[in-house]
Image: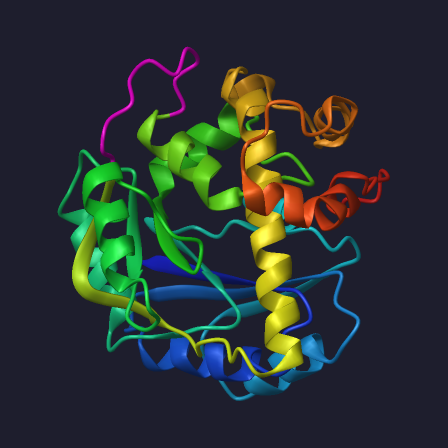
Amino acid sequence: MSKCYSVVTFAYNEERTIGLTLSSILANCDSRLAKLTVVANGCTDGTVKVATDALANTQIAHEIINLELGDKCNAWNQYLYHHLPEADVHFFVDSDVTFTENAFPRLFDQLQACPDKNAVTGLPQTGRNIEKYMELATRYACLFGNLYGLTDEFVRRMVAQQIRLPIGLSWIDAQITKLVNDNLEYHKDDYQQRVTFLTGVGYCFDSLNPWKPQDIKLYINRIARYKAGQLQEPYLDALPFVDWPRDMGEVNARILRKGLVKVNDVKVWLLFPRIKKRLKKTYNDKVG
C-alpha cells in the first residue's frame, strides 16, 4: 500500500465553523488522504447536518460519527479504538480553524522524513502569541491540539497498551505531548523531543473580540479549562500512562477536597467557581 494519511476533526457545537474547516481540509490535502472523519460529541446544534452537507459531494472516503457524550477525550478514545483507518500518519484537528496551503501533505512529508519522531505539529499562523508557540515547539517539543499528526506505529502501540485519555481531562494537549515525548514509557524516564514541525505551516483562527459578550465568555471558559487542567496535571504525572483512570472523577474529587490550599495562581482564585463546576461534572457509563 502506498503511503497515506488520515484526518479526523472533533466538534462540539461547531455549526458556525465546521463547514469552513472541512472545506479547508479538503483544499489543503493531496491524493494521499485516505479518509476524513468527523467526530461530533454531545452536539445540540446543527453541527452534524452542516458536516453532512459539506461532505455530500466529496469523493474522499469519509465518516461522520455522532457521540452522545460531550467530552473530547472520550471522542478521541472512541476514534482510536473503534474507527481508526489504515494510514501511515493520523492527523487530529479542531473544527474551528482553517489550514495553510498544502498543510497536510507538507506535515506528512516532514514526519515521514523524521523516523525518530512520533508526531508533527502545525503552528498557529494568526493570533498574538505566534512567537510564544514557536518557542514551545522548539524548546519543549509541544504539540497543539488544533493540528497535529501521530505516526501509525505510535498510535498502534498506544492502543496495544490500552492507554486512553481520561474522560474529563481538561488540558488535553499537555498530556498528549507527554505521551509522545516520553514515548509511552512506563517509568516516564526517557523524555526526548519527539515532535517535529515546519515553520510557516499550520492553522489559522479568528481572534476573539474583547467587545463581544460571546467571545468574552469563551475566553473565560477557556482559561478556566486550562487552569482546571493544571490542577489535574500532578495527579496524572504521578501515574504510569497505562494506569491512567477511565475518567477524572476521583482526581477531581481530591482536588475539590483540597480546595485552594497552597494555590498561588490569581487566575485560579478568580475563576475557582467556574473551575469547581468543571471538576464537579460526573460521567456515566455512556461513553459511545
Q: Position of residue 31 (x, y in %)?
A: 29, 72
What residue lies at 43% left-to-right and 60% top-to-bottom? Answer: 146
Q: Nearer the viewer, residue 138 or 42?
A: 138
Please indicate, yes or no, whether residue 79 appears anywhere in the rendered image.
no
Left or right of 163 on screen, residue 197: left
Q: Mostly what secondary structure, the magenta segment?
A: loop
As drawn, which residue projects farthest toward the left?
113
Residue 193: quadrant of the picture: top left
Q: Position of residue 167 (x, y in %)?
A: 68, 39
What residue lies at 44% left-to-right and 54% top-to-bottom? Answer: 145
Q: Nearer the viewer, residue 125 or 259?
A: 259
Magenta residues? 184-194
**In the rendered view, would you say 70 is above or below 285?**
below
What residue lies at 19% left-to-right and 45% top-to-bottom? Answer: 138
Residue 124: quadrant of the picture: bottom left
**In the rendered view, would you say 202 is above or below 262?**
below
Q: Position of residue 4 (x, y in %)?
A: 31, 58
